[in-house]
Amino acid sequence: MSEHASISEQPDWARARAIAAGVDIGAVSSKAVILLDGQPYAFSQVATRTPKESAFNAINAALAETRLKLENIHYVVGTGRGRTQVPFARKTISEVACAAAGAVHIWGPSVHTVLDAGGQSCKVIHCTEKGRATSFLWNDKCAAGIGRSMEAFARLVKKEVTEIGNIALQSDKFPKLSDFCAVYAQSEALDLIRSKVPLEQVIAGYHYAMARRIGTLAARAGVKKDFVIVGGLARNPAITGWLDSILKVSRLAPKPEWDPALTVALGAALFAAAFSTAGQRDGRNYQGG
Amino acid sequence: MVKKRSDAIIEHFRRITENTHEYAKSLQGKGRFLAGYMCTHVPEEILYAAGIIPVRILSSHVSQAMTRSYIHETYCSFSHDCAYQGLQHNYDYLDLIVTSSSCIHMGEAFNVWVRFAGFQDKSFLIPYPHIIQTKPAGGFLVESFGEFKQFIEKFVKKSIADDDLEKAIKVYNHTRRLLKRLWEFLRRDNPPITGPEVATVTLASQVMDKQECNQMLEQLIRRLEAEPGKAPSGVRLMVTGGACDDLGIFDLIEHLNYSTNLIFIDSCTAARYFWFEVPEDRPDKLKAIAEGYIGRIPCPAKDNVPGTGEKKRFRFIQQFIEDFKPDGVVFIYQRFCSPQPMDIVALKPVLDKLGIPSTELELDTTVPVIQFGTQLEALVEIIKRVVPIE
Amino acid sequence: MNKGKISAGLDAGHVDTKAIIIGGHEILGYCTVPTGFDVVAAAGAALDYALDNAGISRGELAGIVATGIFRDMIKVPPLDVCGTVPEYVADAKGALFLNKNSRTVIDVGGNIHKAIRYDQDGNILDVIQNDKCADGLGIFYTTMAKAMGLSEQEMSESALKSTRSLSIAIQCALSAESEAVDLMCQGMNIADVADAVLKFIVERVAAMCTYMSLSKEIVVAGGLAKSEALVKRLPGLIKQDVSVLGLPEYAGAIGAAINYENGGK
């Protein structure tokens, strides 16, 4: 998976006062977002290899569509699992704070709960209207890897990971799978396939089980509206759809201009912009720290 | 930089935690009997009165899967590790092993030693009541301690006099008071010792001869009282939860990207180990010991007031919060532990009401440093109200 | 050349589909293709390549026997599968064919690992398979290799060069992946992380082996048997010597093919 695109028509970046970037090194994918004076300029998403490699891959993929070079960026903030392995980042901020900041920037001040459902981990984050995180709950180990296991599941059922969500929604009736752990659910899915249960139903059953797993975590943390889902799993309509009905809290739909998987990188870029401006003005443009 | 004199003593304690077998064997070399124990519900005083040194059995943190044919997969890694060490004959030099019935996982680890590691004739399981907040519990425990005392007397072929018990009680109480004083340093804004160092000393005390330990503690405290502060004041973090002998986690808490101080650890291998006293100079020594142990900060496996379901442990935690003033709380519990997470679920609303943010770290054989570091830094960022503002 | 009856064995596994052509107790040709999205296509492709290798056409085949997790799914035209054999039966027969002194085969595959004990005629004496929590060791290995930018072979070679012993908690492959990634994000040496991954896999396999007594000679089959680092570690944990079968990932396919020869199902 490698997609990158620039958003705005090439403004003259040389005139920008603050060129800031956020790099989110996740376990499965790495993302970069570049802001020019707080406005989205370019972004990218690449498959994670080693963290350091991925940092360069992500930022270069974002830069590729522009005439910007890495050295022109005033400030880079690293986040995500691999944040300490981003050599060109001046500071690191946890993905919790970044998810809150990014989500409120995208969806607005009404956001109160952010579910970051990524490749390796799920977190539920509560935030203020200004995008400041106030509490969070990290998944327990048994709920790890739900996002990544989607890829393994897709291979198991011999479909593309981008289509299984839609396939899952096609069945009204489907078998119940273990909703405690992805490994068990996949094991049971395989048994069902071999017992000739229609593939679409197995796919639906697996998605429902995983949605319930995430839902358990979210319910424990408490979900208050407005509720949004970010991270890779936000692109899976079956997961998000079923989470809606399991949690019974209406969720704000993704915005067309922002892939929800970029939310955390965006948050990091916002921090970078704030640090950059603070440095330039010699004052403090961010709270805390 | 001048090395503080207290550092040398702390280093001595640390070496003991890193070489527990060597230290234990040196005690044997001096002619002492050794009794390994797997849970702090064991009344160490009774052993000590008989001239036996109780030695806490700790985790080796070796990643292995062979114990899965002995105890269930879904038992905590601490119990698996203890079982493993028995099967590997790492502790064959012990003269005796003792445990009290507390949680199932440690109980099974103990059983593995008894049945498969050659400790059948050198072991004792003390029946310990589960519902300790009831009238019958005290009497039950006294009787149980009585049987244990008889077993030990047969084992060392000598009777245990009341005087011996009183001496042991006083030695142990002295340890408890000294350790308390040590932890009290952390209430200060700029203490002469760090939380991880206090944790190290406390862990060492659990494997040491208490008289030797007391001497070292007295020296250490004297020196610390004369020394200036060592740690710059940062965000104050308190740990609460279950057994954790992985000092690396406590080090991690103070080595984040932000300035943080570990100011208290409410765990059975830290503060709960010693935060009580056995009544002294009572005529009935076993009754006094039973009273002391029942009155401790309860383990969640035993904390359940019949009728109300109240958890007595929470009062202690609230007092610690008042005294040590944490900015945030870090819950720690072993993966697959049942009692600890139940307490967490019940305790979180209490913290929410006090406005204290928290995070949970799920312990296992190994420490996922990056993931834990992320959770801890996220907690600190919440405490510091970090947010980008245009 | 008297090839006798020529039969084909197909092992439609979770990750790879293996095909082998056997005639007159000789291996004439073989091929592995990734199972991918289309199980039937993969089986057909593997068969055709194997036939090519052997210089034989489909028409010359007396029969095709299938084994593996998808054996029932590939019993469709144009594949003329005449029978199927459970994996453990095929494994035993295949291992015996490759090493007639073997009496136990430990098969470490993509998703499942198992051990089978058998007699000199290949009759099954005992079987053990991983518990659910230990699924997916082979896939875990492949995923980690990709994450480190290494081929599967390179990862094994890298593990052998490890100078620092790192650990991963032994639970399921999903949490192990999480920890391995954590180690990489800590900046740990790739060789050391690779070694930790291999250690995890071997510990899991060895733990499974404690549930069944193993009879000499013990051989290792399956894709992961090709990992020198794995095979090196295993004897120390199960306290017995092992040897790797030649063509270790083909044990199942061979066993299936032989089954036809012997007039099997």
Image: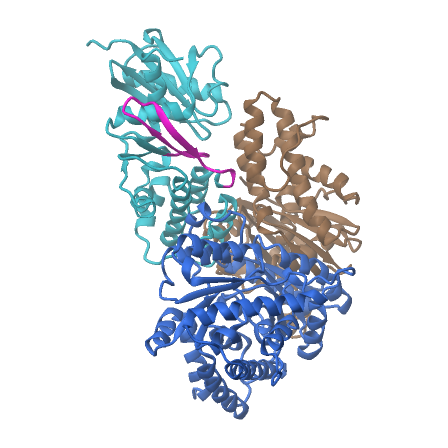
- When the figure is inspected, residue A72 is found, relative to residue C57, above or below; the finding is below
What's the colour of chain A in the image?
brown
Residue lying at 37% horizontally and 16% vertically, measured from the top left: C48
Q: Which chain is blue?
A: B
Instruction: Using residue A138 as the reference point, say whether residue B93 is left or right of it.
Output: left
How many labels were placed on the picture? 0
Residue C225 among magenta residues:
no
Residue B269 x %, y %: 54, 69
- When the figure is inspected, residue B317 is found, relative to residue B103, above or below; the finding is below
**Frontmost residue, A164 versus B110:** B110
Residue A220 x %, y %: 71, 52
Q: Residue furthest left?
A: C1
Residue lying at 38% horizontally and 43% vertically, measured from the top left: C206
What's the colour of chain C in the image?
cyan
Q: Which residues are magenta?
A: C107-133
Residue lying at 42% horizontally and 21% vertically, measured from the top left: C67
- When the figure is inspected, residue B269 is found, relative to residue C210, above or below; the finding is below
Instruction: Using residue A145 as the reference point, say whether residue A49 is left or right of it.
Output: left
Name the quarter where the N terminus of chain B is drawn.
bottom left
**Frontmost residue, A28 versus B19:** B19
Residue C46 x %, y %: 39, 21
